Image (cartoon, rainbow, N blue to C red):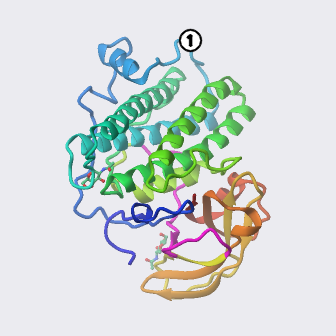
Amino acid sequence: MRCCLFALVTLSLGVNAMPHAPQVMKKSTSVGGQKPFSFPLANGFPNIAQGSDALTEIEKQAHGTLPNGALPTEIADNSVAVWQLIAFNELFEVAYFSNLIENITDGISGYELASPAARNVITTALEAVRAQEEVHALGANGILQAAGRDPINPCEYIFPVDNLDSAINFASVFTDIVLGTLQEALKVFGSDGDAVFLGLVGSVIGQEGEQNGFYRTVDKSALPPSTQPLLTASSGPFLLSALYQTVIVPGSCPDSLPIPVFGALNVDTSYLKAQTQELDFSYYTNETTVSTEGLSLVYINGQNTPVVEKLSNVQLVDDYVHFTAPFPYQEYVMDGLTIAAVTNSVGPFSDASDVAAATLYGPGIIELA
Ligand SMILES: *[C@@H]1O[C@H](CO)[C@@H](O)[C@H](O)[C@H]1NC(C)=O
Ligand SMILES: *[C@@H]1O[C@H](CO)[C@@H](O)[C@H](O)[C@H]1NC(C)=O
């Protein structure tokens, strides 16, 4: 069923103790009955002045401060887009973890933890993460402001989860997408004259990786903390599209970023196995006839060259184009995050950025162990 809320994550993890528990992110378009999350937080975030007590308190909870060195007063336009995307994403993450902590603290249905020790482990970790994401968001906006560029304001959010297992699992999925996208941030900074940011972004990549090891460890499926030897690459438009398609309340964002947002690509196969198989996909169309001539389904996994597949069994049903494509799991050992996209060409594509430049619908999110 493709309807209803932002029911994007078909999380079988709560009931599935297999090491190769499949995860599929599904997309949908309406807000449903959930009350959107909106800022500010009780401490005033994101409106935190430099030198304020509120900032000191955040830094204490984050176990570290914002960088105290001078920031560049000029940065390239491409770098501006990257920092805006990072700020946009970090604001979402602060919203997410604040709401998650609130759910656990209030002990609402689905978020009860019977063991005080387990509760303590989880809330201690998540409170540190929330403050660390606050530092990341303030840092990204601080860089934009120091360079005389527009900082990013928060949107309103809705979360596609309603219990602790699925919430931790979703945190792991979006962290994987962020970890892929920050690889591209390094490429941009390294090639447009803003190499001064490379070390800083490297420190954030490691930090988000530490978080993900924790999410995977507390996941019901007891996944190994580290995913793949080389994490899956992504691209800015995939991260921004995933956020718009899954957590942003439509029309609630005050700022628009100079980055495209694609139509959603649903991965409709509900039980994914770690094996080569034919997968079902769909995307919305307002057209009454369908041609997929010239389109390809592309997979990005690890640091391999993107895999290009043909669309088969194309059908138009109730405004959705349905099709299937092979998922060559075995050949490439496609564990961890795989990003799927419908592109307007057959490539070949050299990397994730190259795929994003030709994408019409995506990202379809597939996670295996
Ligand atoms: C918090 O709980 C509400 C009510 O179940 C849910 O709608 C929301 O998605 C939850 N948020 C998180 C981050 O788990
Ligand atoms: C279909 O959608 C496209 C892109 O959103 C839009 O430009 C076009 O006007 C729409 N066509 C119809 C018939 O609604």
Q: Position of residue 131 (x, y in %)?
A: 39, 28
Q: Is residue 210 above or below residue 109?
A: above
Q: Residue at x 38, y 18 (%)?
A: 60
Packing grade of label 1 (10 A; few <14, some 14-19, many >=20) is: few
Quick one: quadrant of the N terminus?
bottom left
The dominant secondary structure in magenta is loop
Q: Position of residue 148 (x, y in %)?
A: 51, 24
**Front in this rendered view, residue 221 or 344:** 221
265 horizontally vs 245: left or right: right
What is the three-letter code of the residue carrying label 1?
Gly
Q: How many numbered discs? A: 1
Q: Is residue 270 visible?
A: yes
332 horizontally vs 202: left or right: right
Q: Residue at x 40, y 65 (%)?
A: 15
Quick one: quadrant of the C terminus?
bottom right
SS at mark 1? loop
Q: Is residue 194 above or below residue 346?
A: above
Pointer 1 residue: 69
205 horizontally vs 15: left or right: right
Q: Is residue 363 above or below residue 152?
A: below
Q: Position of residue 290 (x, y in %)?
A: 56, 85
Residue 270 inside the magenta-drawn segment? yes
Q: Position of residue 24 (x, y in %)?
A: 50, 65
Q: Residue at x 40, y 19 (%)?
A: 59
**Front in this rendered view, residue 279 or 43:** 279
**Would you identify the image quadrant in which residue 137 lies?**
top left
Which residues are the magenta region? 255-276
Residue 199 inside the magenta-drawn segment? no
**Would you identify the image quadrant in which residue 354 lies?**
bottom right
Q: Is residue 345 visible?
A: no
